[in-house]
Amino acid sequence: MTEIASPHMTYPRILVLGVQPGTPPFRIVEIDGQVVGEATAVTDVLEAAAAFGITVHDLDDPDVVRWVGGDKFTWTRH
């Protein structure tokens, strides 16, 4: 067998980290491994992506956006 039998790992360009305490609570957004800002709502994530020329068609696509510590609906600490 000449092929490697390992799964292909993809790394999305957008990474949204877990909710941080603040007034209001926020999530840190990274694009291409660089911290680009804070988001308090999904629209902030989309605006940051657009600023870097990224069009997001599906916020649930793990090849595009990785949500850490929650999903696109998680904007407060539990």
Image (cartoon, rainbow, N blue to C red):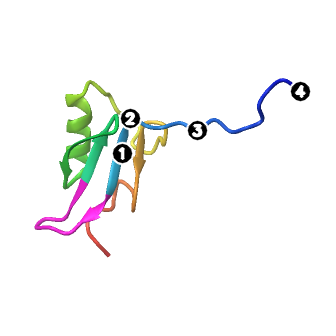
Q: Quadrant of the C terminus?
A: bottom left
Determine which residue is flagged by label 1: 15
What amino acid is labelled 3 in the image? Met
> Considering the numbered disc 3 on the image, is that residue within a helix, a strand or a loop?
loop
Q: Residue at x 68, y 39 (%)?
A: 7
Q: Residue at x 58, y 38 (%)?
A: 9
- Report whether 65 appears left or right of 41: right
Determine which residue is flagged by label 2: 13
Q: Marks 4 and 2, Cα distance to the nearest angstrom? A: 33 Å
Q: Marks 1 and 3, Cα distance to the nearest angstrom? A: 15 Å
Pointer 1: residues within 10 angstroms few (<14), some, or many (20+)?
A: many
Please check the rendered image and state whether residue 34 is part of the magenta-colored stretch, yes or no: no
Q: Marks 4 and 3, Cα distance to the nearest angstrom? A: 21 Å
Residue 24: x, y in percent?
Answer: 13, 65
Q: Nearer the viewer, mark 4 or mark 3?
A: 4
- First in sequence: mark 1 vs mark 4: 4
- Report whether 6 appears left or right of 78: right
Please check the rendered image and state whether residue 24 is part of the magenta-colored stretch, yes or no: yes
Determine which residue is flagged by label 4: 1
> Considering the numbered disc 4 on the image, is that residue within a helix, a strand or a loop?
loop
Does the CB distance between marks 4 and 3 fall below 8 Å? Answer: no
Determine which residue is flagged by label 3: 9
- As drawn, 3 above or below 74: above
- First in sequence: mark 4 vs mark 2: 4
- As drawn, 4 above or below 16: above
